[in-house]
Amino acid sequence: MPRELSSYLFAYGFLKRKFHGNEKTQTPDFEHRFVSEGTLTGDIYRVDVFPGVIYDDQIENLVHGEVFELMDPEHALRILDRYENAKPLVHLDPDYERRLRPIKTDQGILNCWVYEYLKPVNPATIIESGEF
């Protein structure tokens, strides 16, 4: 696997375990193994019915989520990019971009894929607790 293709994913919204198999969220199946709870430095906003994260390593706010190891990263990321309407797969009006970010876990810092929201957010929709 190329170095830039991490096998870890940080889930902070509908990709978290509690939504797997949920017909409303239509979270796709992807082969994975739960690794740890984790935190990302940044802000999380309520965007319509789903959340959006904006990474910012200059603030103290934390976004809480879960880290998964992807069993077949290339295949899983194609599925997840489509589900999230995200770059690099989606080029026409994407909502998110998948980026590598440092995630603090109980196993140390892991470089994980994170779906970061690309569109403007309303500051009033910030989720102060950092958890969706």
Image (tube, rainbow, N blue to C red):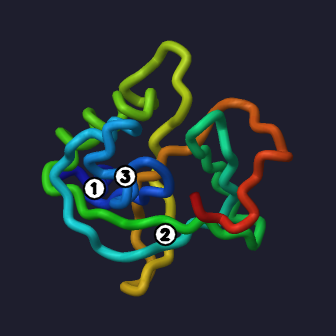
In the picture of the structure, the residue carrying the numbered disc 3 is: 19
Q: CA distance from mark 2 to mark 1?
A: 17 Å
Q: On screen, 55 above or below 83?
A: below
The quarter of the picture where residue 109 lies is bottom left
Residue farthest along the top direction in this orientation: 92
Q: Amino acid at mark 1?
A: Arg
Q: Which mark is residue 103?
A: 2
Q: Looking at the image, which residue is at 36% across and 26% down? A: 89
Q: CA distance from mark 2 to mark 3?
A: 21 Å
Tag in front: 2 or 3:
3
Q: Position of residue 8 (x, y in %)?
A: 31, 60
Residue farthest along the front direction in this orientation: 23
Q: Amino acid at mark 3?
A: Phe
Q: Tell me the quadrant of the picture where the C terminus can be found.
A: bottom right
Q: Looking at the image, which residue is at 47% across and 73% down? A: 38
In this rendering, the count of numbered labels is 3
Circles 2 and 3: CB atoms closer than 8 Å: no
First reached walking from the N terminus: tag 2 or tag 1: 1
First reached walking from the N terminus: tag 3 or tag 1: 1
Q: Amino acid at mark 2?
A: Ile
The quarter of the picture where residue 24 lies is top left
Q: Which mark is residue 3?
A: 1
Is 79 left, or right, of 102 in this rendering? left
Q: Nearer the viewer, residue 10 or 24?
A: 24
